[in-house]
Amino acid sequence: MSLGLSLRLDGVGYAYEETMMSFDLAIAASEIVAIMGPSGSGKTTMLNLIAGFETPTKGRILVGDRDVTADPPSERPVSMIFQENNLFAHLDLFANVALGRSPALRLSAEDRAATLDALSRVGLAGKEARLPRELSGGERQRAALARALVRRRPVLLMDEPFASLGPGLRAEMSELVADLHRETGMTILVVTHSPEDALALAPRMVFIDAGRIAGDGPAQDLLGHAGPDAVRAYVGESRSR
């Protein structure tokens, strides 16, 4: 059964320094969407608004049929994975993942089984006792993904989760996320700076520029020669770096 829920930003506004951001966006249940745009364009801000880490100045945020605009992050049916993966250095891998089930680590037998299952699904079985410093960058990101899986929230937000990884590991993680999306049916938004990652991950891409959605459609089309000027300019700059 599909876990995902639809997501809608309805006239959502947010002021950041001198930039007034405005987002109107509809994501279908169980859709996976890549989010791209220049640094400072509003990609992370949009995710933070959905997750509840920022409060809009106007508009509504709906997950399924529920208006979550005023709900604190802990009460939203949303999980978020950050670039830094947010693992606790003093806790082993099992405990870091199990936090997704119980922040106090008061774990039932079902919680322990779910944690072990999530670790197995992301390829980390047998490494439960390792500390974060004993894991590779790819393994730490896999751990963050496992923690999101045990939370079983219908919407997963990923903010440049592969930015610190090399090309080989990025491709491996993209494949893992795509596999887990097919398996769980979660609604997933992935912020990335890489056109290659966007094409590998998602049929649909949303391009954000200066706090507005400047492009929304099939990733192949937006990233092609006939895509919007803003996208072609950005892709040209990112590939020349």
Image (cartoon, grey):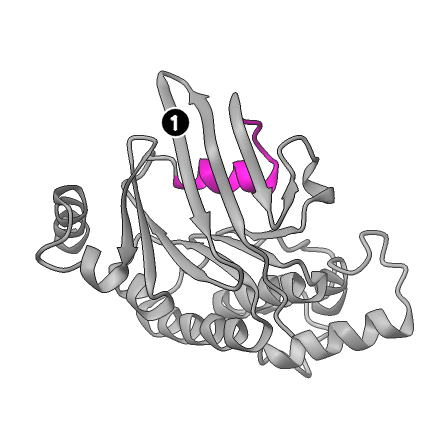
Residue at image location 90% in from the left, 59% down from the top: 106
Q: Main secondary structure of the magenta part?
A: helix
- Give the extent of the magenta segment: 43-56
User: Quick one: which residue is furthest to the top in this view?
Assistant: 18
49 magenta-colored: yes
Residue in front for this viewpoint, 151 or 182: 182
Does 50 sit left or right of 45 as displayed? right
Where residue 113 appears, as percent x and y from the top left, is 81, 77
Vertical position of residue 214 compared to residue 160: above or below: above
Does 96 sit left or right of 230 as displayed? right
Where residue 58 appears, as percent x and y from the top left, is 51, 23
Residue at image location 54% in from the left, 54% down from the top: 6
Instruction: Quadrant for residue 156, please give it.
Output: bottom right
178 magenta-colored: no
Q: What kind of residue is marked 1? A: Met
Secondary structure state at the residue bearing disc 1: strand
Does 222 sit left or right of 205 as displayed? left
Vertical position of residue 146 compared to residue 113: above or below: above
Residue 173: in sight, yes or no? yes
Vertical position of residue 45 compared to residue 100: above or below: above
Residue at image location 42% in from the left, 53% down from the top: 160
Residue in front for this viewpoint, 148 or 123: 148
**Which residue bears the numbered disc 1?**
21
Instruction: Quadrant for residue 2, please give it.
Output: bottom right
Where residue 51 appears, as percent x and y from the top left, is 59, 42
